[in-house]
Image (cartoon, rainbow, N blue to C red):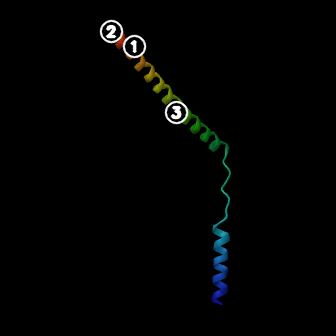
Amino acid sequence: MKTVYLSLLLTTMAFGCGGSKPEPQGPAEKAGEAVDDAASDVKDETKDAAESTGDAAEKAGDKIEEKTD
């Protein structure tokens, strides 16, 4: 009889606790994710632009230094 109860308990735990599907995202969650992605993209692009500006400023400084030597 203990075996039957144990089997029933294990079966209940296996089907009751596992295998559930995640709830689909709602419109607000999808919009929030899109905003997060856009913010991340802007951050990356801003970083790239700042690096390019720094490189250009360094080159300009080198040219000025060459002409004043």
Q: CA distance from mark 2 to mark 3?
A: 36 Å
Numbered badge on residue 63: 1
What residue would you read off at disc 2?
A: 68
Seen at 67% across and 62% down, the residue is 20
Q: CA distance from mark 3 to mark 1?
A: 29 Å
Amino acid, disc 1: Lys
Among all residues in the image, which is located at the extreme bottom?
1
What residue would you read off at disc 3?
A: 44
Figure check: 34 above or below 67: below
Would residue 46 be found to the left or right of residue 16 on screen? left
Q: Quarter of the image holding residue 5? A: bottom right
Determine whether the residue tagged by mark 2 lies in a helix, strand or loop. Answer: helix
| Earlier residue among tags 2 and 1 | 1
Q: Quarter of the image holding residue 18? A: bottom right
Amino acid, disc 3: Asp
Return the residue nearer the eye: 42 or 68.
68
Crowding around mark 1 (Cα neighbors within 10 Å: few <14, some 14 to 19, many 20+) is few
Amino acid, disc 2: Thr
Return the residue nearer the eye: 37 or 67.
67
Return the x and y of residue 7 as percentages of the image width and height.
Answer: 66, 82
Determine whether the residue tagged by mark 1 lies in a helix, strand or loop. Answer: helix
Among all residues in the image, which is located at the extreme top?
68
Q: Which quadrant is the C terminus positioned in? A: top left
Seen at 66% across and 74% down, the residue is 12
Return the residue nearer the eye: 64 or 9.
64
Return the x and y of residue 33 as percentages of the image width and height.
Answer: 60, 41
